[in-house]
Amino acid sequence: MPISEPVQKTADADNRFASQKRTDFGVNANLADVQGAPPCNTAPSKYSETEVLRAGVDSLYLSFHGELRVSLLHKLDQLKEIAKGARCGEERQPTLQLAGVSFKVHAKGRHVYPFVISNKHFSVCIAGNSGFKAPPAYIEISSELLTKYGYENCLDMARKLAKQLFKECDGGSISRFDLCCDFITELDWLSVDPLAWVCRSKKRSEYRESNILTGYVFGAGGDIVGRLYDKTHEIKLSEKAFFKEVWREFGWDGEQSVWRLEFQVRQQVVKSIGCVIPEMFVELMNSVWRYLTEDWLSLRDVLSKDKNRSRWPLNSNWQTLKQASFNLVGIEDINRARFDMCPTDYAIFTGALGYLTSFMAKNEFSSLDEALKHFEHSAQQHFERDEKRTGTLDQYVGKKLAEKLTKFVMPNQDLEAGE
C-alpha cells in the first residue's frame, strides 16, 4: 500500500457511543485542545497476540440535495477568478466565511464540480447550476475532526455547513465511509501463509520498504477496499501526530508499532447495505464490521485436508479484530442478500423526526402536534407549485409505497412455515 495513500479518520458518537463532548460548529481555534473519547472494545481472544486500542469511522463523505443559494454561487464565481490570479502570484488566495469558519476557495474544480472550498477539517465540492445531475454539494470530513469530535458531532457540523450553502436542503446522505480499528500485535505478518487470507476479491497487493512489510491492500479499485498497514510508519509521512495522543489514552506505550485494519466502502455498497441515511449507519456499524471481517475478508488457520477455505477456523488474532466495537448497538447476522430488509424502528423514527423538526424550525412551530396538523397541507401545496414535481401528493405517496412494499420484503408466518 503506498505510504502516501490517504488512509485515515475515526469516530464515535454521543449517547450510543462512548463519552463524547458536545461542540458548536465554529471549533477551529480550540480543536487541538479537545479530545473526544473513541469507543470501547471487547477484550481480546484468550490466545490472541493482538489487542485492539480503538475503533471508529475513519472517513465520511456526505452528499446534500436542495436549492443552492444564488448569491453564494455568484460569490464563488468571483472568488474562483481571484484564485486563478493568486495562483499566478497576482492576488492573495481568496477565502470564504461560512458559519463563522474560513474556507480557501480553489482555482480549479474537482471532477464535475466547478467549485471547491476547503480548510483543515472540511473539503466541499459545490455544483454550479440547477441542471446538475450529481448532488449539488458534497462534503468530506477530515480524519482529525472525526477522531477528536466523533461521528455524530461531525455530522452535525456538516449539516450546519450545508445550511449555509442551500436555501433549504435535506439531512445529507452517506456516499462513502471507512471503518477502522487500530491495534498492537506480536504477530509476524511475514510468517502468515498467503493461503490463510480468504477474501471475496481476488486482488491483493503487498507493500514493503527496505524488506520490511508495511501493509496489504485487498480489492483495490473495487466497491470495498480492505487495508492492513503499519499506521505508526504511515504517520511519519502524513504527520498526523494527534493519533499518538489518542493511542496513549488507550494504553499505548509509545514504542510498539500500531497497525490499522481499515475498510473503504463506496456508494454502491453503501446503498445496498442500507447505510445511506446517517442515522441508519449508526445502527449498522457493528454489523457491517462483522460482515467485512468475517464474510468479505478474513485470516484463517490453514487446514490442508479441507479444500473449502471458508470453512477454515478464524485465526485467533483475527477473532480479536473482528470483535472490535464501534458503539453499544448489538450485532445483526447480516449479509449482502439481506441488506434491503425494512429499516429498524430506530432508523425510521430518528430519520423522520429529523426532517420533521426541520419543518418545525422553518415554519416556527413549537409543538409536534401543531406541525403534524400543517404538514400534509404544506406538502400538498409544495406538489402543486414545485415545477420539478409531476403529479399530486397522493400519487407520489402511492408510488413510493408501492416501491417500498416490493423492496422491503417481510415474509409472514405462513410463508416462513412453507404453507
Image (spheres, grey):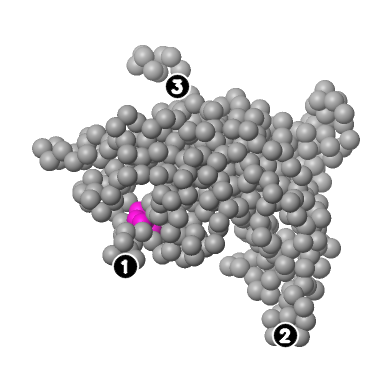
Circle 3 — which element?
loop
How far apart marks 2 and 1 lie (CA) works out to 41 Å
For the residues bearing labels 3 and 1, Cβ distance under 8 angstroms: no
Task: Check disc 2: other Cα within 10 Å, few if <14, some if 14-19, many if 20+.
Answer: few
Marks 3/2 in contact by CB < 8 Å: the verdict is no
Which disc is residue 312 wearing?
none
Q: Percent from the top left, x then y, of residue 297?
A: 34, 44
Mark 2 near mark 1, Cβ–Cβ under 8 Å? no
- Crowd rating for badge 1 (residues with CA inside 10 Å; few <14, some 14–19, many 20+): few
Left or right: residue 313 versus residue 331 is left
Question: Regarding mark 1 in the picture, which secondary structure is present there?
Answer: loop
Whichever of labels 3 and 2 marks the residue nearer the N terminus, that label is: 2
Name the residue nearer the viewer: 33 or 399.
33
In the image, what residue occupies the spot 28% across and 49% down? Answer: 188
Find out whether residue 360 is within the magenta segment: no
Where does the magenta region start and end?
Answer: 215-220
The x, y position of residue 111, in whole percent, is 58, 67
Which callout, 2 or 1, points at the residue further toward the start of the chain?
Answer: 2
- Percent from the top left, x then y, of residue 306? 14, 37
Write the residue at 80% across / 74% down. Answer: 78
Q: What residue type is labelled 3?
A: Pro
Q: Mark 2 points at which residue?
A: 89
**Nearer the observer, disc 2 or disc 1?**
1
Confirm whether the magenta stretch covers residue 217. Answer: yes
Label 3: which residue?
411
* Magenta stretch, overall SS: strand
85 is higher (above) or lower (below) than 256: below
Q: Is residue 356 left or right of residue 45?
A: right
**Looking at the picture, which amino acid does disc 2 mark?**
Gly
Mark pair 3, 2: CA separation: 66 Å
Q: Mark 1 points at which residue?
A: 210
